[in-house]
Amino acid sequence: METLKFYNTLTRKKEVFKPLAPPVVTTYSCGPTVYSYAHMGNLRAYVFMDELRRTLKFAGYTTKSVMNITDVGHLTSDADDGEDKMQSAAKKQNKTPEEIAATYTAAFLKDLGRLNIIPPEIIAKATDNIPEMIAFVEKLVELGYGYEIDDGIYFDISKFDGYGKLSRCNLKDALAGARVAVNTQKRHPADFALWKKAEKNHIMQWQSPWGMGYPGWHIECSAMGKKYLGERFDIHTGGVDHIPIHHENEIAQSEALEGHQVVNTWMHNEFMMVDGGKMSKSLGNVYTIDDLIARGYSPLAFRYFCLNTHYRNKLNFTFDGMDGAKTAYERLRAAISACENAPAADDKTKATIQKCRDNITAAIFDDLNFPLALGEMWTLAKLPQCKEVYDTAKELDAVFGLDLHIPQEKQQDAVPDEIKELAEKRFAARKAKDFATSDALRKQLDELGYTVLDGKDGYEIKKK
Ligand code: AMP
Ligand code: ZN
């Protein structure tokens, strides 16, 4: 196994990474709140998660990674008031929260696929883990960290000595920084909800020892991390916006329950900005992958755009920047894929290729320095055309995920496996004269951008 170094937000240091139980590395990534389409800022967080997981695998580890899908409990305000984001979207669109969750979870998974993001081994929905969350909260109450008031169960941050250690703010700052307490029953203004009691008209609610209610947002990640990865795990990822509240609260809950440190390495991606401010759904300055595709950019050009800036630096989203990324990406891909049938290299070129390969792996093993690695990939692409350039780039693409060795035209014509599967199902339904199913599947394929042409004995599937 190779030596890796990662920057740990908890210690503010780049550290040599030592997994708890190699060759397995356990990781947890805060997943999306599925009340709307993911924007490019959110997707930057998952490109980063993917760079990390691909790097771990490339270095010889196997990953056991969890990502949650937040489909309940994330309120419109961080101060534990406001409406559940799922419920408010459901009302606006005249749908149930389950329908909203299903629509945007499917859209999110499709986005991951388009960006060549390998899905984590475990993708867990918050609503499938309510009993675990209730048990977690019960235990915190039993241990004296949780207390009940009229509208829910809260975490008493003054009981947890390490509160503030991730964001390096002390309890006094946390209290001063907290909004004016909406809820005067809370012991401290910055205490946060573990479980909320539901009003009658709250759509999503479950039976609990405290009556009908729903989980706080932070408890989801603590409970699912424990369930799937155990009482200690290697790495936790998320965007920097989560450091001061969400992750601080996760640490408080999990460490209070276990009585020891739970996560060894905390890794955070910086923001994607628009015009100097954070790209965010609530600010309305967001772009989705479909917006980019409509303007002629491929999802992988966006992946290149992300890789070209270190994950710990802010990245400003502009269409000029996307134009640059698109041109560079297409040139790099064309240069490398053109080497597929090129002749073998001479010894001097072979040595240069080996040096590039070493520089690339050294860069990514040093806290995922993909901008430096991409620069070396360019050095490789500028060498005289030879088979070894193609082979090396193909091998390294396991970590870049940019399909650099596949000519762009070929990929555009290729029909992905999931589409082939749908087309097969439709054909089987048609043969069985189940026209309702076959029509529904044709519609689904149509929405995904594929047309089915039926022939006498078979069918043909084409990209529209
Ligand atoms: P959310 O769906 O809001 O819970 O966010 C999903 C992930 O995207 C989290 O890890 C956030 O920290 C991250 N995120 C949200 N906005 C941005 C942004 N503008 N740039 C980078 N990451 C972001
Ligand atoms: Zn989380």
Image (spheres, helix red, strand yellow):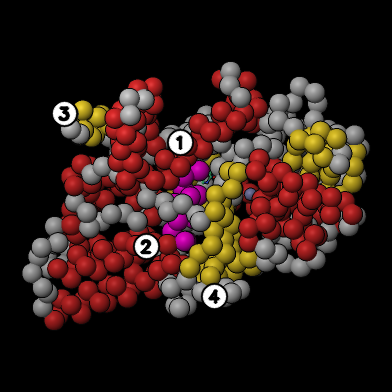
Check disc 2 and report its element: helix, strand or loop: helix
Kindly indicate whether the residue at mark 2 contacts the one at mark 4 (C-beta within 8 angstroms): no
- Identify residue for label 4: 22
Q: CA distance from mark 4 to mark 2?
A: 20 Å
Q: Is residue 437 above or below residue 298?
A: above
Q: Nearer the viewer, residue 258 or 227?
A: 227
Kindly indicate whether the residue at mark 3 contacts the one at mark 2 (C-beta within 8 angstroms): no
Q: Is residue 454 left or right of residue 2?
A: left
Q: Which residues are magenta?
A: 41-53
Q: Of marks 4 and 1, which one's residue comes earlier in the chain? A: 4
Instruction: For label 4, count other residues whose C-alpha is less than 10 Å away and answer few (under 14), some (14-19) or many (20+).
Output: few
Q: Provide residue 456's location: percent of width, then percent of height.
A: 16, 28
**Viewer-side label of 2, 3:** 3
- Identify residue for label 2: 399
Q: Is residue 74 above or below residue 164?
A: above
Q: Nearer the viewer, residue 73 or 159?
A: 73
- Identify residue for label 1: 107
